Amino acid sequence: MATDPSVVGVALPPRRAERAAAPGSSWAGLILDFARRRTLGAAGGVVVVLMLLTAALASVIAPHDPYETNFLDQLKPPSPGYLLGTDSFGRDVLSRLVYGSRTALKIGFGAAFVGASIGALLGVVSAYFGGKIDLLLERLMDILISFPLLILALAVVTALGNNDTNVIIAITIPIIPRVARVIRASALTIRQMPYVEAARSIGAIDMRIVLRHMLPNVMAPYLILVTAFLGQAILSEAALSFLGLGVSEPTPAWGLMLRGASVQFVQRAPWLAIAPGVALSLAVFAFNLLGDSLRDHLDPRLRL
Amino acid sequence: MHRYVISRVALMIPTLLGVAIIAFVLLRIVPGDIVLLKLAGDGGRIEESVLQQERAKLGLDKPIALQFVDWIWGAMRFDFGLSMWTGRPIIHEVAIRLELSLQLTIMASIIATMFAIPLGAMAALKQDTWVDYAIRLFSIGGLAMPGFWVGIITILCLLVFFHYLPPLTFTSLLKNPAENLAMLIWPALTVGYRYSAVATRMTRSTLLEVMRDDYVRTARAKGLAERLVVVRHAMRNALLPVVTVIGLEFAFLLGGLLVTEQVFNLNGIGKLMVDAVARRDYTMTQALILLVAGAFVVTNFLIDMLYVFLDPRISYS
C-alpha cells in the first residue's frame, strides 16, 4: 500500500493521501480488480459471502429446529426428511450445520479481529519505541508463543466458564504474539520512512505518530493477518470444542458435532463425522484462499 | 559470535522464568482441588483431617511463595519432583510417553519434508500452471482440514474399505517394529499432511523469490543446466526459511498433539497433559508446560545457530 510515500502524505491524513495518489480507485473498483486478477481468491471470497449469508439467514434456510430432539429418529441416515441425517439425539444434522456457521463466524471473527488488533498495536509500539520497550514486549511475546496453547485455553475456560466470550479470549491470546511479530517487522521499515521523521520534526507527539502515521500503513499486513487467522481461529474453536473445552452442548457448533457420538458411531453413522468436517474444511479453506490471494495482491513479500 | 550465543542463551532464562510464573499462577487460579479429586473422586465426603493430611503430604499446606521457590529451585536442577496424582517421579512418567510422542513427531517430520520440498519446488518452477494450482489447493487443503477430522476419516476409511483397525496398544519400535509402525503410521500421516502443507507453501514462496535473484540469472547466463541452477543455486538459498518452519513445527508437535492423540487413542505427552490438567496435578502440569516451552525456545535457538552454518553470509554480532 504505502510503498510510495509522497511528501503530501505528511501533512494530509494517510488515507486521503493515498486516494490522491491513485485517482478513481473506489472500494468497488478495488474489489473488481482483485476478482479479475486473483481467481482462486475470488472463489474463496464467494464461499465466505455464502457462509455469511447462511449465518444471517439460518432461521430461513434450516429445515428443522437445531435444538429439537426426536427420540424416534435417532441416528437416521440421510433421507428427504433429514437431508444429512440425524444425530444420536435425533436432531437434524443439516439444521445444526447451518446454525453452526453462526458459532464459527462469531468466534472466528471475534478472535481474529481482537487478536490481530491487539497484536498490531503491540507490534507497532514495539517497533516505534525500540530500546527497552521493544525488548520487554518481545520477551512477553516469546513467553506467550512458547506457552502451550491448550493449557491457556483450559485455564481460561475452566476458570471463567465456557461461554462464547471466554472461548474467544482463549483463542485470541495465542494469536496476539504471532501477529505482533509480523507487524513489528513491517513497522520497523515504516519507522525509517521520511514521513515519520517529518512528522516527528514538526513536533507530533509519539501517540499521534503511532496512531495516525504508523498504524494506517500496516493496514495491508493487518488485513492479510486477520483473514489468515480467521481460518485458524475457526479451527482452534473446533479443536477446543472437540476436546470439550469450547462451546458447550446443546449449542450447534461444528467442532462439537464431531465430538462423542460421531466418533463412537463412526461406522454406523458416518454422516455424523463427514458433514461437519466438510463444512469446517470448506470454511477454513475459503478464508485461507482469500487470505493468500490478499497477500499476493497487497504485500507479496509478507511471510506469515 | 560467542557473545551473541551467550546473550541468546541468557535471554532464554527470562522467557522460561516467565512461562514458569504464568504456569504456576494460572494453575492456582483455576478452580478445583487435587486433594478432593484424588480422595473423593466424583462424590462422597471425606474427613477434613484426612484432607489436611494429604495436603501436607503433597506440600500444599506451605505458603504459596515457598511452594513456588521450592519448585523453581528443583526445576533448575531438572528435578521436577513427584506427580501429585500418581506419586511417581515426573521424569519417569514423562519418559514413558516421550518415546511415543518423539517417534510420532519424527515420523511426521520425515513425511512432511519428503513431500514438502519436491512439491513446493514443483509449484514454484511451474508457477501459474495447473501443476501449481493443484499443489496449492492440496496444501491449502492440508491447512484447512482439522487434524482430528482427517484422523476420524482415516479410521473410517480403513474400517469401511479394508475392514482393518490399527493396533490399539503401543509396542516399542525396538521390540516389534512392524506392530509399532502399523499403529503410528496413520497418525503420522494425518499430522504429516498438515505439517507438509505449511512447509510446501514456504518452499514455494521462498523459491519463487530466490528464482528472481541476480545470481540465478548469472547461473543461467553461464549456461548451467536448469536442473543445476535450481538444485545448486536456488534451492540452497530457498531452504533456510523452510528449515525454520520445519523446526518450529517440530517443537510445536512435541507438545501439541493433544487432539490427534485423542482420536487415535494414543498415550503420549498430549494425553498426559490433558489428564494432568483435569486432575489438577500441579507438579505434573507445571513440568509439562516447562518441557513444551523449553523445547520451543531451544529449537528456536538451534535454528538461529543452524543458519550460521547453512549460510556463511550470516554472522551474528
Image (tube, rainbow, N blue to C red):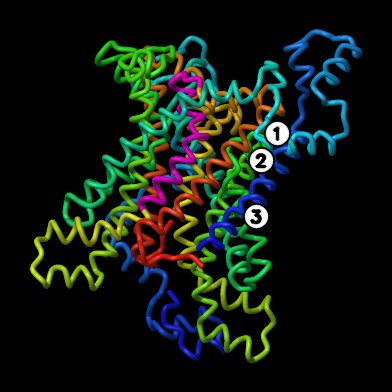
**What is the C-alpha distance between the residues marked 2 and 3?**
22 Å
Q: Which residue is mark 1?
A: A161
Quadrant assignment for the N terminus of chain A = bottom left
Q: Is disc 2 surrounded by few (<14), some (14 to 19) or many (20+) residues within 10 Å?
A: many
- Mark 2 or mark 1: whose residue is earlier in sequence: 1
When the figure is inspected, residue A68 is found, relative to residue A237, above or below; the finding is above
In the orientation shown, which residue stands out farthest toward the front? B2
**What is the C-alpha distance between the residues marked 2 and 1?**
7 Å
Chain assignment, label 3: A
Which range of residues does the magenta coloring cover? B242-267
Give the number of the mark in front: 2 or 3: 3
Q: Which residue is mark 2?
A: A166
Determine whether label 2 and label 1 are within 8 Å by CB.
yes
- Residue at 66% of width from left, 21% of height from top? B89
Chain assignment, label 1: A
Q: Which residue is mark 3?
A: A140
Q: Position of residue A89 (x, y in %)?
A: 52, 16
In depth, the one of B223 and B28 nearer the eye is B223
- Residue at 82% of width from left, 25% of height from top? B59
